[in-house]
Image (spheres, helix red, strand yellow):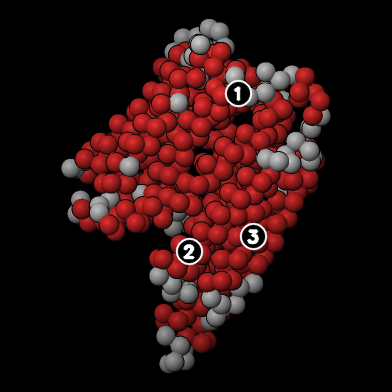
Amino acid sequence: MTANAAASSIAGRRQAATALMIATAMQAFDATIANVALPQLERGFSGGIDLGSWVMTGYLCASAVTAILSGCLRRRWGPRRVFVAAVVLFVTASLLCATATAFYALIFFRLLQGAAAGIIQPLSQAIILDIYPKSEHGRMLAIWGATIMAGPMLGPVFGGVITDLSSWRWIFALNAPIGAVALLGLGTIPSGAGSGDPGPIDGVGIAMLAITTGSLQLALQRSIGQIWPPSPETLCAAGIATLASATIALQSRRARFVLIRFEVFRDANFAIATLYNFLVGAILFTTIVFVPALGEGPFAWNATQAGLVIAPRGIGTMAMMLTIRYVIDRVDHRALLALGLVMTAGAFNWMARIPADAGETWLAAASAAQGVGVGLLFTPLSTLAFSTLAADLRTDAAGVYNLARQLGCATGVAAMTAVLQARIHFHLSELYDQARNPSFSPERLQAAASFAAYTDCFRLLAIITLALLPGISLFRIIRRSARETTAT
């Protein structure tokens, strides 16, 4: 039986989907699993915080670039060949990271790993949409989204255990057996390119796109904690990104720009969903950063306590995404989005009202509530994004869609960090009179100002989340019967 025939059978689809989700979960784990190992890694190479920053930033920059290229690569070599190559590259780069003996070697291998990860996530999403009929897209996207949510939830836990029991090197070596299992099931993925003539390779476009995306991502990542005045590195990266993007704009006017098929934005549902994906990513990723920081800062909790506080968020998200697959085709997607936004805003307001003497239970409960709200957002949003999009545009659209979320995450953290710093300075000036009291130490003053600033930020995030509600009405809903008649 050929791969195309296998993919059309129920057993073949399940095998392919399982392998795709294992590979997706593998790269999702690696986005967070290295975080807890950074202190040991930095000591191992006798480096400072810059080393850890490059380990994370390099991965994000490389994955951001290749996410956009996934559509071009698929049209040229076909989905199965490209996906298998990406998994092999990811596993190989992981093993090279595990055996790296020099700082620069580790950064280079981490870039390779991120480049492979950037292809795996959007291409796996597009292939799942290809092999399943449209009537099942909502259910499959819910399951696929749950595998992505498993990474941020379980990655730090596994990374911490592995690092404590052995070495940071094993967190990279772990990808070898996982990747091998994924490769065993990829034979049923269709091998056809799926969109005819891929056109010539746009070398200038690839270079400009890599420079634009990488520089922008780097500028956003490096500006976290130092918004104003911006560092020379941040200004340089932002300037390079601006020049490179201007070059892309000029080239797209003079000739066909084959790397990004801009016609994906002609679909109103996809254009609106991509904007929402950017904004939702900005809002929610900020929470992942701020909640542990609040715990380890003003509340003086240890890392384990802070990790346990954020864990219920992942559990709530996974539970809701696995549950929503049963109702996704029976309920108006806009109603699910509205409910998700309201619940998320309510969770932010809950966090904003946390007492200064509260324990872990308060934030853990608020995190769990927010997780449920997040689970109500991602699946309907993804389903709406691709519900009216032509099949031959899915991989290109998936790359753009994932890039929007990634840039949203970085932008949100950078912007809210600036707000946080401004509010800390504001509350420090308010508490100035108390600082003259000998019993009110500078540490206590800083903790009080930071606590008030975090609650201000959570309150602002609640307002921003509610402000997204009116835009939901812009989505165009296709009736279920129409989707079924166009099933592939």
Type of amino acid under label 1:
Ile
Which residue is at a point 42% across and 50% down the rendered structure image?
Answer: 155
Which residue is at a point 43% across and 92% down the rendered structure image?
Answer: 438
Q: Which mark is residue 308?
A: 2
Give percent across and percent down for residue 228.
Answer: 47, 56
- Residue at the spot of label 3: 369
- Residue at the spot of label 1: 10
| In-image side of 488 versus 437 (left or right) | right
Q: Which of disc 1 and disc 2 is earlier in sequence?
A: 1
Specify the quadrant that holds the C terminus. Answer: top right
Q: Are marks 1 and 3 in contact (CB under 8 Å)?
A: no
Which residue is at the front of the view, 362 or 71? 362
Report helix, strand or loop for mark 2: helix
Give percent across and percent down for residue 270.
Answer: 67, 31
Which residue is at a point 81% across and 29% down the rendered structure image?
Answer: 479
Q: Which of disc 2 and disc 3 is earlier in sequence?
A: 2
Q: CA distance from mark 3 to mark 2?
A: 15 Å
Report helix, strand or loop for mark 1: helix
Type of amino acid under label 2:
Leu
Q: Which of disc 3 and disc 1 is earlier in sequence?
A: 1
Q: Is residue 194 above or below residue 219?
A: above
